[in-house]
Image (cartoon, rainbow, N blue to C red):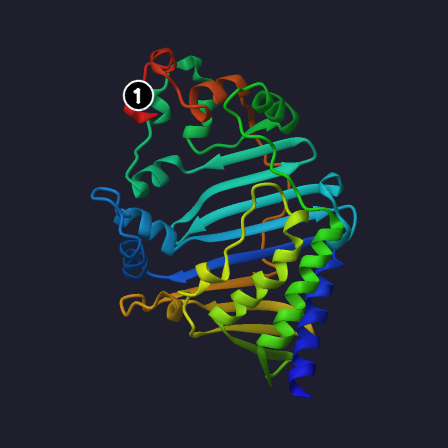
Amino acid sequence: MEQLSAGKKLDRAFEDLGKKNTLSFELDLDTDVTSLKALDAQSDPAPGDEMPDGAAKLISGARITVTVQSRKPIDESGEKDLVGMAMKISNADGGLAEYRVIGETAYVRADMATIGKMTGTPVPTAAELPPHAGAIKNLIAGKWVKFSTKEMQKAGAGSPDSPAPAPSLDAKTQKKLVAALREVVAREVHFKTADGSDGIEHVTATAPFRALITKLFGKIRPLVKDLPPGMELPTDKDLKDAPATDVKADFTLKHGELDKVHVDLAELAEDTKVKKLGLTLRVGHGTRPAVPAGATELDLNELMQGFIAGPGASDAAALDLPQDQL
């Protein structure tokens, strides 16, 4: 009875999220530099390609907040129904990057100096850029810049090196995937509930990782014809070396609504040096998709040619910058 009621409570909580027109959440990586370096070592990187300490510090303290606003309930919405989106990446020292979309205008700002220092790839300062760099100077200086999303799509479509738009799943296939997920979860996941105070309830979901993902992909494979082209699923043989250990997720419900999810992944690493590795999702935390004041217009041709598309010698010369800083 407890198994059934716990699963139903989680189902209802997730369904309630889909009925909202605005959805906000915060994703926090619960780890440390030592654990990340140990995980990096497991991948056997080539000499010189090891994760820098600065990058490990950046990732270990990273926090991502996302808010999506739609004209319709989220579970009924398509891309055309979305009216606003905001995403912010931050760490203990403050905001690192922020991206908002309001209507057909996108707004961006980033702490380029801090990001460059932490990742070991320093960028030029705004003062080092020539006057004709325009709004790119503001971007480098960490100020808000803006551009038209339609113009960005046109600029991307006109570039021979630009990737094709990512194919998306139709609503029917999405429902089949959700049904497959629910069936596997109902059979493989053990639920346990514990009541707290002030309307707080904790639901713990535990399942053997290898069995869970093996059966989940087994359910998805019959749907592969409906998935985007080029999407390959792992075979049972590919998954045979996946950790067989249990993975546990803790869900916190507040008055029946999903408030927080924590997943402990340290056991899956199968490395004694990985002592801290988890993900925490907090619902209701996010940045409001509001138009920031003082944003300057970004020249998309300048951006695409000089920065995103990868500048050549002529681009570097035009901005009076050494190529190793681009």
Please name whichever residue, 141 or 250, is drawn nearer the observer in this view of the structure: 250
Q: Residue at x 62, y 78 (%)?
A: 200
- The residue indicated by pointer 1 is 323
Please name whichever residue, 261 or 273, is drawn nearer the observer in this view of the structure: 273
Q: Report x, y in % for residue 205.
A: 56, 76
Q: Residue at x 33, y 30 (%)?
A: 123
Q: Report x, y in % for residue 190.
A: 57, 80
Q: Looking at the figure, which quarter contains the N terminus?
A: bottom right
Q: Is residue 317 left or right of residue 151?
A: left
Q: Looking at the figure, which quarter contains the C terminus?
A: top left
Is residue 255 visible to us here?
A: no
Mark 1 residue type: Gln
Is residue 72 placed above or below 38 in the rendered structure?
A: above
Q: Residue at x 43, y 65 (%)?
A: 240
Is residue 198 placed above or below 80 in the rendered structure?
A: below
Please name whichever residue, 129 or 49, is drawn nearer the observer in this view of the structure: 49
Furthest toward the bottom, the residue is: 1
Quarter holding residue 87: top right
SS for dot 1: helix
Q: Report x, y in % for residue 160.
A: 53, 20
Q: Report x, y in % for residue 254.
A: 65, 73
| Total numbered labels placed on residues in the image | 1
How crowded pointer 1 is (Cα within 10 Å; few <14, some 14-19, many 20+) is rated as: few
